[in-house]
Amino acid sequence: MAEPIILCDTEGMTEEEWLACRAHGPNGDIEYTIGGSDVPAILGLSKWATPLDLYKIKKGEMAPPPKKNKKQLEMGKRLEQIAADLYEEKTGDTVINDTFLYQHADVPYALANFDRRIIRKGTGARGILECKSASHHVAGDWSNIMYPPYYEYQLRYYLWLADLEEGAFSAWWGNNPDTDHVHPRLFRDKRKEDWMVEKIEEFMWRLKNDKPPEMTDIAPKLALQSLAQIFAKGNAELPMVEVPVEFEKDLRELAGLQGEIAMHSSKMKGLEKDVAARVVRIAEFMKENEHGELKTASGRFVVDYVTKSKQLTDSDLLKEQYPEIYEATRKTSYSRKVKVRLEAI
């Protein structure tokens, strides 16, 4: 394998220019491309997107979902330099900024931007550095010199594309560089790399042959979110579809499970009614008090009746006083739920 091809320098590009360049190359002549952030979704490792989401976006059948955490992503970009500086200070490796867009020497659709390049202290070995900023609640993903799998394969993709043997992460999540920063190293693994490349090639084949990926092995919650977004609104005018016999086992089990949930839900409603009847008596006694106790021979009962508040928009008042704003801020949402029932012949 050879050095990757430099397609262009992305320095100074607007986000729109960079996205267009990454999607079809600087000349717009690559039908489909794969970038590092696409790889976790292709492999079914992403927490945010399924292979089918990515397929629909690449085919132009679905717009990329709006970034709900856009400010957080912008801040992460700004904080890359801090992560790079921390890594350089702790390791002694040389860190080099790199703004080029690269193409795999033998695979034209494989493109990549690297956060930073690194040169190892002592050995002079070249590598790639991925800079990550995180919040405290995901710090555990980086414990014991580990890294989240969706980031692991992003870096493995870069090493494969650049034909380099090693890389590293610089991840931080607080203001104490001794406890809130890690810099684990990663080396190429042929077995993992072959599996990754095989999955990428299969995905590209699906794109070129109009064969959408299935949801096999995708986390059910993420898969349902994806399907709800892609097929949000049903068509009531379509005829009843004939379900293949291969789904019989799933349908039987699903009908049984939904029936069991309904039975337990009925019991839950009864229990909630009993709870409410007793809660009324306690609440009536507590009045303005938020805490109480009842001491017994074996212990004590602690009662919390704490005030909590949250701000809600009074939609009726908004509609009455500011009807134009009310109409402008309304949006239609759709939801669909699979329900199965077994009918006797």
Image (cartoon, grey):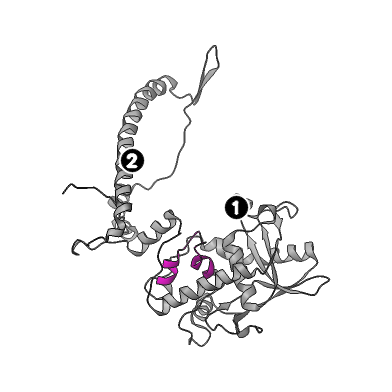
Q: Which numbered tag is attached to residue 261?
A: 2
- Quadrant for residue 8, please give it: bottom right
Please state the horizontal and vertical placement of residue 330, each as a whole percent of the image.
32, 58
Q: Secondary structure at mark 1?
A: helix
Q: Give the residue at the far top of this rendering.
A: 297
Q: Does the magenta portion include 54?
A: yes
Kind of residue at disc 1 = Val
| Residue at x-position 65% and y-position 73% | 159
Residue at 51 percent of width and 73 percent of height: 200
Q: Quadrant of the N terminus?
A: bottom right
Which of marks 2 and 1 precedes in the sequence?
1
**What mark, if any, has residue 138 been given in the picture?**
1
Instruction: Estimate the x, y position of residue 328 in percent, counting from the top left.
Output: 32, 61
Residue under the point 60% across and 81% down? 102
Find residue 184 and report its image quarter: bottom right
Q: Does the magenta portion include 239?
A: no
Q: Is residue 82 left or right of residue 10?
A: right
Give the extent of the magenta segment: 38-56
Vertical side of 14 occupied by 307: above or below: above
Q: Is residue 322 above or below residue 287?
A: below
